[in-house]
Image: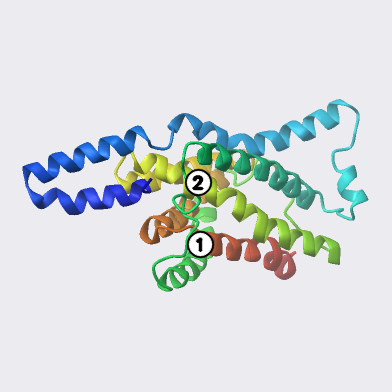
């Protein structure tokens, strides 16, 4: 089965062959759409943060400290333990989704798990990281002027590793696990599911909107920031038909946000 972004591109290329060529191409596209990624599964991508909240809620309901396990493992930073639990829940969700798609005949390569066509993709990913780091300033300024809170909490807690154990966990979770959880969901599944039905520009914006909503638990300002942020990996995935530059972009962004920012400004 061809990835739908290949089908859409071939449709555009062959549409100039005349009426017969267009008819054949549209018929082929219709066949691919019947075999396309189901939009009805999109709510599943939100299961990770929801499941994390449920785990903490059940623990508190049972009179347990949801951060107690983290402390027993040497993780005293509450934000880091919260992200770790989310990453574990998200890994379960991503695994279930990929297995379900495999059952429908989709391979990992078709979902973007393949090398890009050239190394320029990685240069674009690096440029994208610089861009989204600078993007924080105008978004924070707009939030300040409009009174839009960046976070729901008045004094939000950020990941701030203070020990060797916490630094290792922050690196593993933030730099490796979280990108591996979120990129297949949004730039692998959601982007292609939308691109099968919409123009690619709308598909890129659509997955970015959903990624912003994915961060609703963080705050309204962060929803705006992550919406704009997600346009970059969406463009990377569409341009190079690969998740690899998206994973690099996401990992380097989290190196900055989860490791360097606490060290420099914590």
Between residues 30 and 90, which one lies in front from this camera angle?
A: 30
Measured from the top left, where is residue 226 in percent x and y? 53, 50
Name the residue at the top extreme: 61
Secondary element under disc 2, as helix, strand or loop, is helix
Residue 109 in the figure: left or right of residue 100: left
**Dot 1 corresponds to which residue?**
244
What residue is drawn where x is 35% and y is 46%?
4
Residues packed near mark 2 inside 10 Å, few (<14), some (14 to 19) or many (20 plus): many
Specify the label residue 141 is tagged with.
Answer: none
Between residues 20 and 257, which one lies in front from this camera angle?
A: 20
Measured from the top left, where is residue 180 in percent x and y? 60, 54
Q: Quadrant of residue 121?
A: bottom left
Measured from the top left, where is residue 242 in percent x and y? 45, 59
Q: Quadrant of the N terminus?
A: top left
User: Disc 1 or disc 2, which is closer to the eye?
Assistant: 1
What residue is drawn where x is 34% and y is 49%?
5
Give the color scheme: rainbow, by chain, secondary structure or one colour: rainbow
Between the C-alphas of marks 1 and 2, the distance is 13 Å
Does the CB distance between marks 1 and 2 fall below 8 Å? no
**Dot 2 corresponds to which residue?**
186
Measured from the top left, where is residue 209 in percent x and y? 46, 42
Residue 235 seen anywhere in this rendered image of the structure: yes
What residue is drawn where x is 55% and y is 36%?
100
Above or below: residue 120 compared with residue 113: below
Between residues 7 and 77, which one lies in front from this camera angle?
A: 7
Residue 80 in the figure: left or right of residue 70: left
Residues packed near mark 1 inside 10 Å, few (<14), some (14 to 19) or many (20 plus): many
Above or below: residue 135 compared with residue 85: below
Secondary element under disc 1, as helix, strand or loop, is helix
Residue 209 in the figure: left or right of residue 178: left
Above or below: residue 6 compared with residue 34: below
């Amino acid at each position: 089965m061809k990835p739908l972004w290949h089908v859409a591109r071939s449709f555009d290329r062959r549409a100039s062959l005349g009426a017969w060529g267009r008819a054949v191409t549209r018929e082929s596209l219709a066949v691919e759409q019947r075999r396309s990624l189901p939009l009805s599964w999109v709510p599943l991508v939100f299961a990770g943060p929801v499941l994390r909240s449920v785990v903490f809620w059940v623990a508190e309901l049972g009179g347990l400290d949801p951060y107690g396990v983290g402390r027993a493992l040497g993780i005293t930073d509450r934000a880091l333990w919260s992200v770790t639990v989310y990453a574990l829940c998200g890994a379960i969700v991503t695994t279930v989704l990929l297995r379900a798609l495999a059952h429908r005949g989709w391979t990992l390569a078709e979902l973007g798990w393949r090398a890009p066509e050239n190394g320029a993709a990685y240069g674009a990913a690096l440029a994208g990281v610089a861009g989204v780091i600078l993007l924080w300033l105008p978004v924070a300024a707009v939030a300040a002027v409009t009174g839009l809170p960046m976070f729901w909490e008045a004094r939000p807690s950020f990941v701030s590793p203070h020990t060797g154990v916490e630094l290792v966990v922050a690196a593993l979770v933030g730099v490796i696990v979280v990108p591996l959880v979120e990129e297949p969901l949004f730039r692998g599944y959601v982007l292609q599911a939308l691109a099968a039905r919409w123009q690619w520009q709308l598909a890129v914006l659509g997955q970015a909107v959903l990624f912003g909503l994915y961060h609703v638990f963080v705050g309204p300002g962060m929803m705006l920031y992550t919406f704009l942020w997600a346009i970059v990996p969406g463009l990377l995935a569409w341009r190079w038909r690969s998740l690899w530059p998206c994973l690099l972009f996401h990992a380097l962004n989290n190196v900055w946000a989860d490791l360097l920012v606490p060290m420099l400004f914590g």
